[in-house]
Image: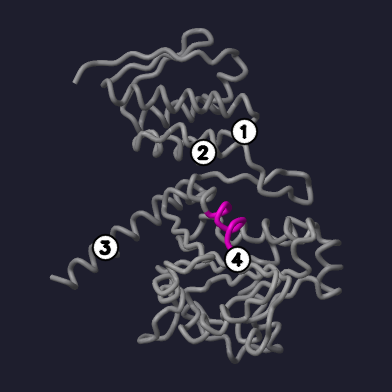
Amino acid sequence: MGTGIRKISAGSADKLQRVLGAFDENLNLIMAELSVNIRVDGADVVVSGEEDRAAQAASVLENLFALADKGENLDKGRVSYCIELAKEGKASDIKKLSSDVVAITSRGKPVKCKTVGQKRYVDSIKKNPVVFGIGPAGTGKTYLAVCLAVQAMKQKQADKIILTRPAVEAGEKLGFLPGDLQTKVDPYLRPLYDALQEMLGLETYTKLMERGSIEIAPLAYMRGRTLSNAFIILDEAQNATREQMKMFLTRLGDGSKMVITGDITQIDLPEGKKSGLEHAAEVLKDVEGVGIIRLNDKDVVRNPLVMRIVRAYEQDDAGRKKGEKE
């Protein structure tokens, strides 16, 4: 394969520095991941290497310069994701992510989708009354759902936000800990509290909780209710049984929206109990008004190491399943 040389203009020294990153960490990451050589020539960047790799690296840099023009944060996670897209010939997709603001936090920080998978998830929630967001830890499933719930309330599209989780221990038994039921289930619901407080601010969050406009409760408390004009989120849904999932989904009332999130690789149900999340995603895949979005390791937006950990576990699980079949 021939050698390719590409020159990309940054346009300004300031933009160039933002794309290169502190101590050229972004530049070094691109070179390491794509096996190319990159040198800086004034306000230009010159890429050399195998033709395909040089083209991929040039595409990454062009899109990073475009993001820099829009004031986007170019951390290692964003750069790594852009490299992954370039390897698939989809680097230009990252431009789609900077335009839409999902929500604004209480401190005025815009929340935007960071991956194409996240954008599909957000678009599906806006379009469908019921959406399943299935994927590994760190993909923003719960956080984005809470952001959209707060937006719906602010825009008078929902009178109430209801957040729920199955109260299933992750390998630990909490039944004999002191305190009432609320004290015992609070640790399970902490990520939901944190996301709401970030979006609303502590004072507004407290007022809405006291007024009953935000309700956070274990899944078992949903039985027998009809939930109308509400934005309802079922988190950690992989730990709901089939019966619980059916019960929950049939609570949907007029003017309501449901988002069900979970990670089917982290099921804590007793052995022999099938996850209601897996079952529902299969049974409802062709039902109109139900969106099923599957996120993967490329959609992990935490520390890049989390992406590598998720990928390693997925490879291990695939190997185990293959060994069991053989």
Tell me the residue that label 4 is attached to.
Answer: 129
Write the start and end of the magenta stretch as one range. Answer: 121-128
Q: Is residue 239 magenta?
A: no
Specify which label sits upstream in the sequence, 4 or 3: 4
**Three-letter amino acid code at the position of disc 2:** Arg
Q: Position of residue 180 (x, y in %)?
A: 71, 89
- The reply to whether the C-beta atoms of the residues labelled 1 and 2 are less than 8 Å apart is yes
Q: What residue is rendered at 50% in x and 80% in y?
A: 240
Disc 3/disc 2 C-alpha distance (Å): 27 Å
Q: What residue is rendered at 54% in x and 48% in y?
A: 119
Disc 4/disc 3 C-alpha distance (Å): 33 Å
Q: Position of residue 93 (x, y in %)?
A: 47, 36
**Three-letter amino acid code at the position of disc 3:** Ala
Badge number at residue 72? 1
Specify which label sits upstream in the sequence, 4 or 1: 1
Specify which label sits upstream in the sequence, 3 or 1: 1
Mark 2 residue element: helix
Tell me the residue that label 3 is attached to.
Answer: 318
| Above or below, 212 relative to 84 | below
Horizontal side, residue 22 vs residue 71: left or right: left
Q: Which quarter of the rendering shows the C terminus?
A: bottom left
Instruction: Name the front one of labels 4 and 1.
Output: 4
